[in-house]
Image (cartoon, helix red, strand yellow):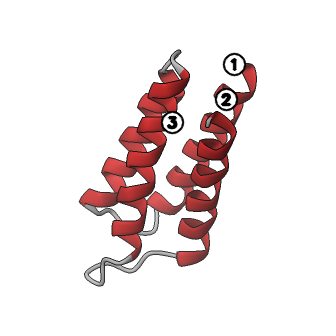
Amino acid sequence: MKNTKLITSILIMILFSFGVFAETNNLDQAVQHAEVAAKSANLKAIANYSEEAKKYSNAAKNNTDHQIDSKHLDKGIDSLNNAIKMLM
C-alpha cells in the first residue's frame, strides 16, 4: 500500500508540473482523478481513478486549443500506465 501511495503522489506531482503550462478542463479533470486515486485506500479504486486520469490526460494531449508541453504530459501518462500495471 505504501508503494501505491508513493506512485500516485509522484504522478500527481507530474500532472501538476505540466498543469502550469496550460489550463484546460481535461487537464483539470486528470489532476482531480489523480488526487482521488492518491487518497483512495482501495486498490481497485486507485486503478479506476488512474484510468480516468489517463483518459483525461490523453484528451488534454489531443487538445489543439491550448499549448501543453507534451514531454511532461507523456511522462504523466507513462506514470499512470505504470501505476495501473502495478495494481492489476
Disc 1 crowd, CA 10 A, few/some/many (<14, 14-19, 20+): few
The residue located at (59%, 44%) in the rendering is 84
Label 3, secondary structure: give it.
helix
Question: Which residue type carries mark 3?
Answer: Ala
Left or right side of 57 for 81: right
Mark 3 is surrounded, within 10 Å at the Cα level, by few (under 14), some (14 to 19) or many (20 or more) other residues, namely many
In the picture, the disc for residue 47 is 3
Q: Are marks 2 and 1 in contact (CB under 8 Å)?
A: yes
Q: Position of residue 22 (x, y in %)?
A: 38, 68
Q: Which mark lies nearer to you, 2 or 3?
A: 3
Residue at 38% x, 57% y: name it.
Answer: 55
Could you say which quadrant of the image residue 75 lies in? Answer: bottom right
- Which amino acid type is marked by label 1? Met
Instruction: Name the residue that disc number 2 marks.
Output: 4
Tell me residue 47's x, y (percent).
Answer: 51, 36
- What's the mark number on residue 14? none
In this picture, residue 82 sits left or right of residue 17: right
Residue under circle 1?
1
- Tell me whether the residue at label 2 lies in contact with that at label 3, contact meaning CB atoms closer than 8 angstroms: no
